């Protein structure tokens, strides 16, 4: 088992991610890069690592195996890729959202293809307990095929929607859609550079296997109050041919399969679940580097797919009709939708 040295980019949320490396025998955080010198000093003192304000200097000096970039979405993700690959980095972890508009995602995909670098996106919910159980059900067939999903969240599209869509794709084994019918409204978040999105989105997706997904997001949640004990932040229900399964980010997760007299119910608390999921996510980076046959569940291609599906709902909203997929949303259409929303708020 190889030992891997990690460099963190970002001295705010990056400290939280760095903490998840502690106690993993074959992984160690050795450096941190942050352009804000006050924040850099605080992070370096807390983590007891070397500090840098220049990314390429850190790469040249420290020669890390892994770079974990935890930066605001206004920093395009593709800028970390080629310098890391040129410095011999084996894996790059980037924060969600992977992009705010289509061209940013395209630049990231191009850099990935050019370098061949292993890129992972911090959608750690694929490593929570409910996700582990879902994968068990897929392996033994006990849940059957999922045929309907209700997915709803309270939060910003460029924040919580990315997690919500990622879990939907996990449940459907990352297949694509044939059609989407979407609508958006509310333009205040376009005035916030770090978010750059409508306030509310609702979409109905039809996937290649016929599964329908009712997908809704709002700054003030709608559609979640009917779930007792739920938290509006992230709720999913999966109906399948042999039973059902659910997950509430703060409430419960569980399942009720054919032949079971009562459902199995487990409490959830994201403050605790996130520690488990982020640690498992982190360990899985080293596992993938050790063994190509155990790839990470949050590989970039899945996040790119999820981003494109959210943008497809934007495109439907712009056109005002159900659309076939592809084509994907363009930057010009992104701007046109933004202007439509702003003009109608």
Image (cartoon, grey):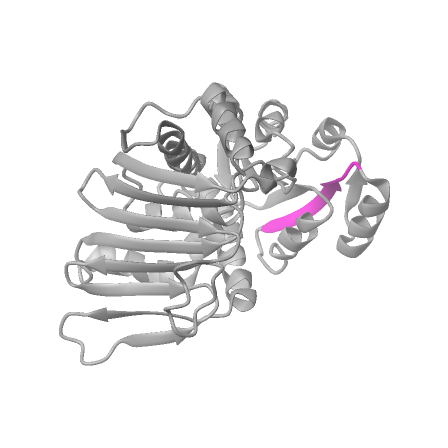
Quadrant for the C terminus, please.
top right
Magenta part, dominant SS: strand
User: Could you say which is closer to the camera, residue 24 or residue 52?
Assistant: 52
In this picture, is 294 found above or below 233? above
Which residue is at a point 52% across and 22% down the rendered structure image?
107
Image quarter of residue 246: bottom left
Q: Position of residue 180 (x, y in %)?
A: 29, 36
Query: Extreme front residue here?
Result: 344
Q: Is residue 243 left or right of residue 183?
A: left
Which residue is at a point 80% across and 49% down the rendered structure image?
44
In this picture, is 318 found above or below 95? above
What is the total number of numbered labels drawn onto the structure image?
A: 0
Q: Is residue 174 left or right of residue 298?
A: left
User: Could you say which is closer to the camera, residue 298 or residue 206?
Assistant: 206
Image quarter of residue 149: bottom left
In this picture, is 127 found above or below 261? above
Q: Position of residue 204 (x, y in %)?
A: 30, 44
In this picture, is 95 found above or below 15? above
Instruction: Please indicate, yes or no, whether residue 115 appears anywhere in the rendered image.
Output: no
User: Could you say which is closer to the camera, residue 232 or residue 61?
Assistant: 232
Q: Is residue 134 left or right of residue 143?
A: right
Image quarter of residue 22: bottom right
Extent of the magenta region: 27-35
Query: Extreme bottom residue here?
Result: 261
User: Could you say which is closer to the camera, residue 206 or residue 255?
Assistant: 206
Q: Position of residue 9 (x, y in %)?
A: 68, 40
Q: Position of residue 302 (x, y in %)?
A: 39, 38
Instruction: Please indicate, yes or no, whether residue 221 appears anywhere in the rendered image.
Output: yes
Which residue is at a point 51% across and 34% down the rendered structure image?
341
Q: Is residue 341 left or right of residue 166?
A: right
Residue 203 painted magenta: no
């Amino acid at each position: 088992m190889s030992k891997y040295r990690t460099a963190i980019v970002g001295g705010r949320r990056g400290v939280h991610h760095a903490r998840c490396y502690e106690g993993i025998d074959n992984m160690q955080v050795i450096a941190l890069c942050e352009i804000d010198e006050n924040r850099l000093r605080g992070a370096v003192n807390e983590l007891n690592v070397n500090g840098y304000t220049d990314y390429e200097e850190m790469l040249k000096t420290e020669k890390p195996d892994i770079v974990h970039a935890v930066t605001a979405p206004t920093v395009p993700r593709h800028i970390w890729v080629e310098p890391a690959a040129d410095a011999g980095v084996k894996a790059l972890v980037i924060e969600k959202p992977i992009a705010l508009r289509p061209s940013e995602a395209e630049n990231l995909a191009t850099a990935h293809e050019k370098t061949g670098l292993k890129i992972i996106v911090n959608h750690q919910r694929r490593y929570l307990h409910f996700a582990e159980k879902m994968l068990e059900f897929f392996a033994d067939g006990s849940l059957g095929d999922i045929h309907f999903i209700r997915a709803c969240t309270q939060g910003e599209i460029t924040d919580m929607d990315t997690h919500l869509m990622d879990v939907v794709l996990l449940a459907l084994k990352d297949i694509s859609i044939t059609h989407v019918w979407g609508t958006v409204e509310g333009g205040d978040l376009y005035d916030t550079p770090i978010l750059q999105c409508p306030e509310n989105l609702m979409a109905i997706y039809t996937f290649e296997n016929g599964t329908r997904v009712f997908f809704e997001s709002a700054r003030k949640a709608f559609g979640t109050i009917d779930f007792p004990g739920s938290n509006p932040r992230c709720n999913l229900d999966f109906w399948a041919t042999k039973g059902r399964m659910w997950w509430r980010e703060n409430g419960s997760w569980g399942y009720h399969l054919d032949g079971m007299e009562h459902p199995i119910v487990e409490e959830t608390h994201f403050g605790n679940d996130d520690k488990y999921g982020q640690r498992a996510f982190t360990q899985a980076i080293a596992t993938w580097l050790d063994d190509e046959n155990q790839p990470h569940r949050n590989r970039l291609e899945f996040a790119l797919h999820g981003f494109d599906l959210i943008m497809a709902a934007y495109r439907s909203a712009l056109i005002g009709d159900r659309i076939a997929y592809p084509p994907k949303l363009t930057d010009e259409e992104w701007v046109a939708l933004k202007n439509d929303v702003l003009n109608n708020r």
